[in-house]
Amino acid sequence: MELLQLMIGGLANGCIYGLVALGFVMIYKASEGVNFAQGDMMMLGAFIALGFGNTDQMGLPFGVAVLLAMVLMFGIGWGVERVVVRQIFGQPQFALVILTIALGFVFRFVAGSIWGYTPLVLETPFAGQNLRSGGIVISLADLVTIGVTLVLTLALWAFFAFTRIGLAAQAASQNQMAAYIVGVPVMRVNSLIWGLSGAVATVAGVLYATRGAIDPNIGLLGIKAFAAAVIGGLGSLPGALLGGLIIGVVEPVAGRYAPGELAKMSPYIIMLIVLVTRPGGLFSQIQMKKV
Amino acid sequence: MTVLSTRNLETFYGAIMALRGVSIDVDQGEIVTILGANGAGKTTLMKTIAGLMDPEKGTIDFMGDQIAGLDPDRVVQKGIALVPEGREVFPYLTIEENLRLGAYTRRDSSADDLDLVYEYFPILKERRRQAAGFLSGGQQQMLAIGRGLMARPRLMMLDEPSLGLSPLLTQEIFGIIARLNAEQGVTMLLVEQNAHIALATAHKGYVLEMGRIVMAGSTEKLRASDDIQEFYLGRTGETQRDQKRWKRRKTWR
Ligand SMILES: Nc1ncnc2c1ncn2[C@@H]1O[C@H](COP(=O)(O)OP(=O)(O)O)[C@@H](O)[C@H]1O
Ligand SMILES: [Mg+2]
């Protein structure tokens, strides 16, 4: 019973890691580099939603506040690609790493100067509500987190699989030159992907905030989410989600049954094990020979 | 009617001048071939026309519009499709998705064109749900040509379609290229290392050397030229047998 309880909470945590990991993967596929500001985008998204929604701030209805935050973060992601990332196009991957680390500092600074560094609580309609069934107690926030992640992942999958622009984005990530040749406006597609990952990060941030207070440093969670993305193969959306879920579930279980230090290290231990045994990650696309 | 004409195109890779003033004309319904050794600038010429590279100088006139310096998606929209060197398919997408992407810039329906591509390349229809990365080299070339057709181009540019293919497959691909030209009236600009088959398929040809056009004319005329005979078709005539190779000068220098 206790194990089940732990696992449900872990699953919900894992969903948040997974959503941030999805952002890593989308940008990795579009810009061929890692966006180390992904965690900070999550943090900023959460604060913007708080700014729109909390009663002592703008006091908009919760749903409206979240939607507005997603739109705003879409714009911020889009703008970052448009104005900054595009300038270093063609530079070594390292340039993007440095750039996004710096961007993370900027986001933290902006959030810190607007909302301060003391933890704040996002007001949500389902705060503190629990469901009881048998011997286990499930918080409504956990259920919402799992449900929203499921829906968002399906929506993203449908976007990439079935829409014209989604297909173009896949094409650009597989063979950029060929994408240009068939007439895909690759740069504009990349901006869109950065925007999308900003919106997804916002959802992750809001879900995180439904489970506890937030401060400008919660973006550090991005490091764990990065481990999740690597476990999944860094090029695979389902892999990223799975990687997040694995880390999310193992963490509390290890925390219960293993020494504390080991539990804290567990995400990175899993990452190392996966990297050693399957260097391409769990979901590495089968290497097909290009004749 | 002239579909494409370039004048004095100059294109650089950094400080390296790859095109040194290239002027060519392609008329409606023609197959025009560009011959030239490795590194002559053939691919660079196609990339410049397709908008993948911008020329430093010169003009590209396509159906009366200046297209030099346009982005590649605008060039495709104007009606130029490139079938690139090395095929460049999307390996993890299915064959049908690859083909649909060929029509990416089109607003009208491309259903008829899909049928047409499948008619010319039945193997693609058979394998349409498979990932393109699993196709053989010849099938990937068919896919690349099919993808180009999906744009319903006024001009199709093919960069070394025989690269890495067996002689038999090369024959098959060129047979289809000739049929597409004759039956569908597709105007083509064709770059090819295999001068025999290129001169047999095309109507007109240019010879590119070190980024310059050094010879032009109908394929009959080119085939008859001594230089082409020796340097591209690999035949040595009786009279040249005892001349030392280094003494022989190409007439265009
Ligand atoms: N990416 C590149 N960077 C620098 N030089 C290049 C590049 N691609 C081609 N070149 C140079 O440009 C010239 C023309 O190349 P290319 O157009 O590929 O020739 P071809 O297709 O006729 O074999 C060559 O001298 C080649 O070395
Ligand atoms: Mg070439």
Image: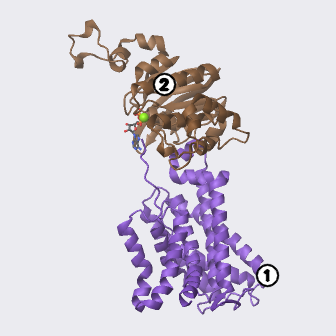
Chain colours: A purple, B brown
- Marked residue chain, label 1: A
Which dot marks residue A61?
1
- Helix, strand or loop under label 2: helix
Say if A2 sits above or below B96 in the image: below
Residue at image location 61% in from the left, 73% down from the top:
A201
Residue at image location 50% in from the left, 19% down from the top:
B201
Give the x, y percent position of residue A68.
Answer: 73, 74
Q: Is residue A222 visible?
A: yes
Give the class, few, some or many, for how many residues have Cα within 10 Å of label 2's Cα (few <14, many ≥20): some
Residue at image location 52% in from the left, 68% down from the top:
A240
Q: Quadrant of ligand 1?
A: top left
Which dot marks residue A219?
none
B11 left or right of A48 in image: left
Q: Nearer the viewer, residue B32 or B51?
A: B32
Say if B132 sits above or below B216 in the image: below
Give me the C-alpha separation between circle 2 and circle 1: 66 Å
Which dot marks residue B172?
2
- Marked residue chain, label 2: B
Give the x, y percent position of residue A27.
Answer: 54, 63
Q: Nearer the viewer, residue B141 or A78?
A: B141
Q: Is residue B251 visible?
A: no
